[in-house]
Image (tube, helix red, strand yellow):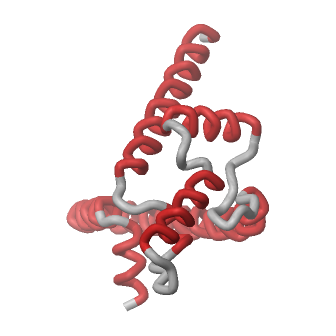
Amino acid sequence: MVTNLATRLLQAFAVLVTVSLLIYFLLDLLPGDAAEQLVGPAYDLTTEERAQRVQQERERLGLDRPLIVRYLEWLGGMVTGDIGRTVRGAPIAPLVGDRLAVSLEIALASVIIALLVSVGLALLIQALGQDWLAKFAQATSSAFIIVPQFYLAFLVVL
């Protein structure tokens, strides 16, 4: 059992590193640059001055270093609990911490409501003994699982 648990933990670690590496590299392929966004159009600057400011921002943000070096620094920070800084330089951890309690509260409330509704519906369907009602409930729940959550939220708001 201990061997099985160790194997599973090692596999989970390998998956996490692989997925983080893939996402990190794919994000680097996206068009645009944080330094370009920070400098903005800068209509009062010449092309050379703007390019110089963009290069300064790239150096300040560390975007001038090789991608693998940035990834390893990010991974090291994640392991030590430093989840990074915003583009403006503020630490991200307090921002996440401030919102974590509310997010956990919403998640817990959602789970409790889902359990109450699902158990209630299951008991009602079982008491009625209607096979078609059970199939309808299963199809409806499958449909809600398939629909992306952000789209479902948009529809609920509408």
Q: Tell me residue 39's x, y (percent).
A: 54, 72
Q: Tell me residue 122's x, y (percent).
A: 42, 62
Q: Is residue 77 above or below residue 109?
A: above
Instruction: Pick the residue in front: 152 or 41.
Output: 41
Rendered residue at 49%/70% (across/down): 50
Q: Is residue 145 above or below residue 22?
A: below
Rendered residue at 46%/67% (across/down): 48
Instruction: Pick the residue in front: 108 or 77.
Output: 77
Instruction: Pick the residue in front: 32 or 128.
Output: 32
To which quarter of the image does residue 125 belong?
Answer: bottom left
Rendered residue at 51%/36% (across/down): 66
Q: Tell me residue 16's x, y (percent).
A: 51, 33
To which quarter of the image does residue 121 belong?
Answer: bottom left
Rendered residue at 42%/88% (across/down): 157
Residue 129 seen in this snapshot: no
- Label count reads 0
Most distant residue in the top direction: 3
Q: Is residue 130 above or below residue 73?
A: below
| Quadrant in which the N terminus is drawn | top right
Q: Tell me residue 10's x, y (percent).
A: 55, 19
Q: Is residue 148 left or right of residue 56?
A: left
Q: Is residue 48 left or right of residue 134?
A: right
| Quadrant in which the C terminus is drawn | bottom left
Instruction: Pick the residue in front: 42 or 130.
Output: 42
Most distant residue in the bottom direction: 158
Residue 58 seen in this snapshot: yes
